Amino acid sequence: MNKLVYHKRVTSLKQKLSRMTADTVWIIQPENRRYLSGFKASDAQIAESSGSLLISEARSVLITDSRYTTAAKNEAVGFEIQTLGQDLIEEFPAIVNQMGTKILAFEEDYLTWGLHGRLVEKFKELSPQVNLVPISGLVEKMREVKDDLEIEVLATSAELIAAVLDEVISGLRTGITEKAVAKQIEDLALEAGAEDLAFPSIVASGPNSALPHAVPTNREIRPKEPIIIDVGVRLGGYCSDMTRTVFLGKPMPDFRKIYRTVRQAQLAALKEIRPGVDTDYPDSIARQVIRDAGFGKYFGHALGHGVGLATHERPRLGPRKPEKLKKGMVVTVEPGIYIPGRGGVRLEEMVVINKDGPRILTKAGNFYDFTS
């Protein structure tokens, strides 16, 4: 990513900070950290961080430990690098104090309650005292609209997984297990140059396909039953996400109807994806198609979500908290119908919103034409 891109993003954040009561913002969320600095390290678990950012009007600091110092110096654009020892509680407040901070805004969704409590006590000991104030969605909102470079990387990520999925679908056969298909997806993706999977692949056959986020099992794939394959990779830090439902042989009539309904719902929603449209409207269109076909109670999740440095990010295409779609957003469109104990169908496209509508990035697999 061009160094000027990170400078522009940090400058934009500082402008937002100038309109807030806080004088320093603490960026903890890994994708937000990478978006602003270019620092690529990930966090293995919620209680273990590879680093965070402190940004004020005058300074941009990346705090990490000795495991990541060299990488941070090589990757973090325009940031001072400060290496802490093993005790964040003892050393972090001093850095905050050195920056002249009086009010520190922190990402409330990514700071554990225990750490928050300990820091509050430490900040009381400082002179002047530092107050913690929560913020939510500040950088996530900036990430909603992708620039041309981001869209190019997202498109490449989508092309990679689409090619992998085409190969996997063409090789499906009776008797292969869900776990074996998932392993094949991972192997092919890494061989094709993916950094990693964007999320654990979902391969769900027969009754398992009624579980929207099923975990692959040792169940063998059988003829005529639905097989949901939901996959994505990470490339250049950016994710892809797509789903196809396939059958070995001719499906039963009820699943022909379910598949046809889901595809019609998806196509109807895609027609409404354009700048200026409220995010709840495409969801309502798809939901109405499914409801009219008699399957309304079997579509429980939202129509889609944003995709970028995280697989699931803003905006959300769903019935709650609508906002306007904008040119440059990248979202999924993924209606589904899930019949408990029998199976389900989900179809998912990842699209970039252009001024005249959506451009599909995940082109793979032929869709069934169950018109009769």
Image (tube, helix red, strand yellow):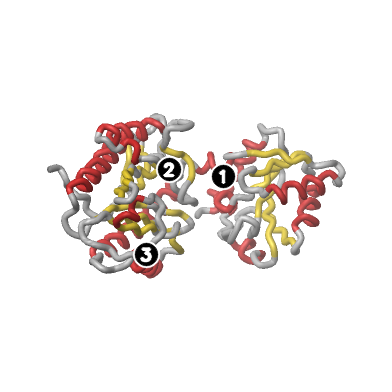
The residue labelled by disc 2 is 305
Q: CA distance from mark 2 to mark 3?
A: 23 Å
Residue 250: quarter of image: bottom left
**Left or right, residue 130 beside residue 147:** right
Q: Can you name the residue that lies furthest to the front here?
A: 341
Nearest to viewer (mark 3 / mark 1): 3
Q: Amino acid at mark 2?
A: His
Asked if residue 131 can be seen in this view, the reply is: yes
Crowdedness of circle 3 by 10 Å Cα count: few (<14), some, many (20+)? many
Image location of residue 341, percent across then percent down: 33, 51
Whole-Å distance between the Cαs marked 3 and 1?
A: 40 Å
Whether residue 85 is situated above or below residue 102 in the rendered picture: below
**Looking at the picture, which amino acid does disc 3 mark?**
Ala
Disc nearest the viewer among 2 and 1: 2
- Dot 2 falls on a residue whose secondary structure is strand
Q: Amino acid at mark 1?
A: Lys
10 Å neighbourhood of mark 1: few (<14), some, or many (≥20)? Answer: few
User: Which residue is identified by label 3?
Assistant: 182
Q: Nearer the viewer, mark 2 or mark 3?
A: 3
Q: Earlier in the sequence, mark 2 or mark 1?
A: 1
Residue for point 40% across, 43% down: 331
Residue 8's disc number: 1
Q: Foreground: 354 or 362? A: 362
Lower position in the chain sequence, tag 3 or tag 1: 1
Q: Residue at x 45, y 49 (%)?
A: 150
Given residues 28 and 225, the one toward you in this image is 225
